[in-house]
Image (tube, rainbow, N blue to C red):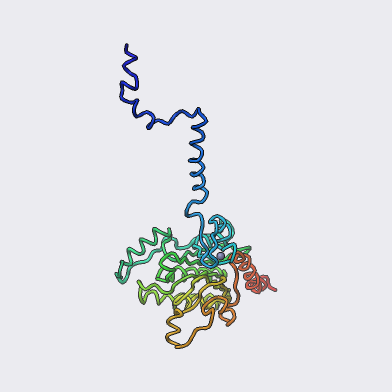
């Protein structure tokens, strides 16, 4: 008969069947065998890697979602994790009010710099990894009721180094603020001038400060916000000439690194040297403001700093 020729035995499947095909899920045994497997899988899903971050200050494992909701501040010890420029802008400005300026400006390898890697390849690498064109985003926004010019640096792009693009974008932002009579806020995080651009990056120090001088002559307020770390050429130029200079808790702020200073001065450095708290005690900065209070504080500072101007405009 035709049907008998299609048995499993005749097709050579009988011997393999138990190993290849699982038994039908009808017996109590099958259910019992399956359960532990599912349980172990779901346990793994509960704590997958990459969802927790260890706080470098208090060693607590913080749930990433919780960290994001807390603006990347440790819920236990208030350590301020680094935060990207876009995240920071999102945390500060009123929704949908940020109009970015010079978004497409990119650096040119003017010196044809080559070291372990060429400057061009570094730029490509960081553009890809950060989604940024350079180490700063600038734009006009609203903080509370105030329209303001805002520049925010990002340490993830080549250590937040200040090259021609950072200098030029900032200078244009400051000039725009002067022209439109807007207060200015610059949030810095930087290792200093960008060595790949040599003297061209050092020239940005004078250029940005020159533009800031015109902004000051127009009696417009400038708030400089220092975040961890703000060092070297950036601290030695626009970051340290704010009408108001504020910092995030624990931020490392300085010009040369502590080892260089220790070797030059041939003296032990005091505890807490180059921290925001130390610099507040010694008068270099005016206030320390936590990230969660930054938006509200900036709005309040702008209230005070623009009050006289508003009064004059109203003929008071
Ligand atoms: Zn912590």
Q: Quadrant of residue 58?
A: bottom right
Residue at 54 percent of width and 60 percent of height: 61
Foreground pick, 40 / 50: 40
Q: Residue furthest right?
A: 316
Quadrant placement of the C terminus = bottom right
Residue 218 seen in render: no
Q: Quadrant of residue 221?
A: bottom right
Quadrant placement of the N terminus = top left
Residue 301 percent coordinates (x, y): 63, 71
Residue 79 percent coordinates (x, y): 56, 67
Residue 134 percent coordinates (x, y): 42, 64
Foreground pick, 145 / 52: 52
Residue at 35 percent of width and 64 percent of height: 122
Foreground pick, 220 / 112: 112
Asked if residue 246 is positioned above or below residue 133 in the image, the reply reads below
Rendered-image quarter of ligand 1? bottom right
Residue at 44 percent of width and 77 percent of height: 233
> Residue 64 vs residue 130: left or right?
right
Foreground pick, 14 / 237: 14
């Amino acid at each position: 008969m035709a049907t008998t020729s299609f048995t499993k035995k005749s097709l050579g499947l009988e011997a393999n069947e138990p190993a290849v095909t699982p038994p039908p899920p009808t017996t109590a045994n099958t259910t019992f065998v399956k359960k532990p497997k599912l349980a172990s899988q779901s346990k793994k899903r509960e704590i997958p890697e990459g969802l927790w971050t260890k706080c470098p200050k208090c060693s607590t494992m913080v749930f990433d979602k919780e960290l994001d909701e807390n603006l990347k501040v440790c819920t236990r010890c208030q350590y301020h994790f680094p935060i990207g420029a876009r995240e920071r802008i999102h945390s500060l400005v009123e929704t949908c009010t940020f109009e970015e300026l010079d978004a497409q400006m990119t650096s040119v390898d003017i010196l044809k710099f080559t070291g372990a890697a060429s400057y061009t390849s570094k730029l490509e690498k960081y553009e890809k990894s950060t989604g940024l064109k350079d180490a700063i985003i600038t734009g006009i926004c609203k903080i509370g009721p105030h329209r303001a010019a805002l520049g925010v640096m990002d340490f993830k792009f080549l250590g937040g180094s200040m090259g021609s693009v950072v200098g030029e974008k900032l200078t244009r932002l400051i000039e725009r603020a002067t022209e439109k009579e807007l207060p200015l806020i610059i949030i810095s995080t930087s290792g200093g001038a960008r060595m790949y651009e040599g003297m061209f990056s050092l020239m940005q120090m004078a250029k940005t400060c020159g533009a800031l001088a015109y902004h000051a002559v127009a009696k417009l307020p400038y708030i400089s916000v220092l975040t961890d770390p703000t060092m070297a050429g950036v601290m030695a130029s626009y970051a340290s000439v704010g009408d108001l200079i504020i910092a995030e808790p624990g931020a490392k702020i300085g010009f040369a690194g502590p080892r260089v200073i220790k070797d030059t001065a041939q003296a032990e450095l005091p505890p807490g040297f180059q921290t925001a708290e130390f610099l507040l005690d010694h008068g270099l900065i005016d206030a320390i403001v936590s990230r969660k209070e930054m938006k509200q504080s900036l709005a309040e500072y702008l209230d005070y700093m623009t009050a006289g101007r508003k009064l004059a405009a109203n003929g008071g």
